[in-house]
Image (cartoon, helix red, strand yellow):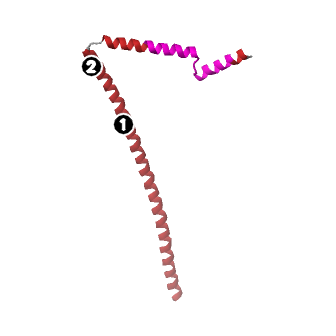
Amino acid sequence: SKLDRMLEDEENARKRGTMTMEQYEAVKFKMAERQLERDQKLRQFSAEELKALFESCALVISKVGRGYIGRKRYKKLNEARDFKKKQSAMIVSIQKRVRGIFGRKRFKRIRNIYLENVRGF
């Protein structure tokens, strides 16, 4: 029936974390209440207390910013190090192949010279 489907939809929404309109309104109301409480507390602070609060907030914000920049820098350096590592491995591989080609050519030339000298006798 229609009521069963509505209850099922509401249960699925609850499992997904989707709120009903009543829940949304309640959360919205609580958020507004808390904001009013914070504003009221800030109004009661003296100038020195406000200054100390803002300085501590600024310190927290700068710590978070420095942490973000540090993590970003670390990631960039790590990627650069990995790239250099892969690049050097590829360079060694290329050198190995080229040296192998030149070595085989050299050996072939030496073998031909040796065979010509052996046949010449």
Query: Looking at the image, which is closer to me, 81 or 96?
Result: 81
Residue 28 in percent (x, y) is at 49, 16
Residue 5 in percent (x, y) is at 70, 18
Query: Looking at the image, which is closer to me, 61 or 6?
Result: 6
Residue 37 in percent (x, y) is at 39, 11
- Tell me what residue is drawn at x 50 percent, y 71 percent: 104
Which residue type carries mark 2?
Lys
First reached walking from the N terminus: tag 1 or tag 2: 2
Q: Tag on residue 70?
A: 1
Q: Tag on residue 42?
A: none
Note whether 98 is above or below 68 in the view shown. below
Q: Circle 1 sits in a helix, a strand or a loop, which is it?
A: helix
Q: Residue furthest left?
A: 48
Which residue type carries mark 1?
Gly
- Tell me what residue is drawn at x 33 percent, y 14 percent: 42
Q: Circle 2 sits in a helix, a strand or a loop, which is it?
A: helix
Residue bearing the label numbered 2:
51
- Tell me what residue is drawn at x 41 percent, y 15 percent: 35
Magenta range is 6-33
Q: Nearer the viewer, mark 1 or mark 2?
A: 2
Q: Residue 29 in magenta?
A: yes
Q: Quadrant of residue 56?
A: top left
- Tell me what residue is drawn at x 54 percent, y 17 percent: 24
Is the magenta region chiefly helix, strand or loop? helix
Q: Residue 10 in magenta?
A: yes
Q: Is residue 7 left or right of residue 93?
A: right
Q: Quarter holding the N terminus?
A: top right
Q: Residues within 10 Å of mark 2 (few under 14, many from 20)?
A: few
What distance separates the C-alpha of mark 1 from that of mark 2? 28 Å
Q: Residue furthest bottom?
A: 121
Q: Is residue 35 left or right of residue 47?
A: right
Query: Looking at the image, which is closer to me, 52 or 119?
Result: 52
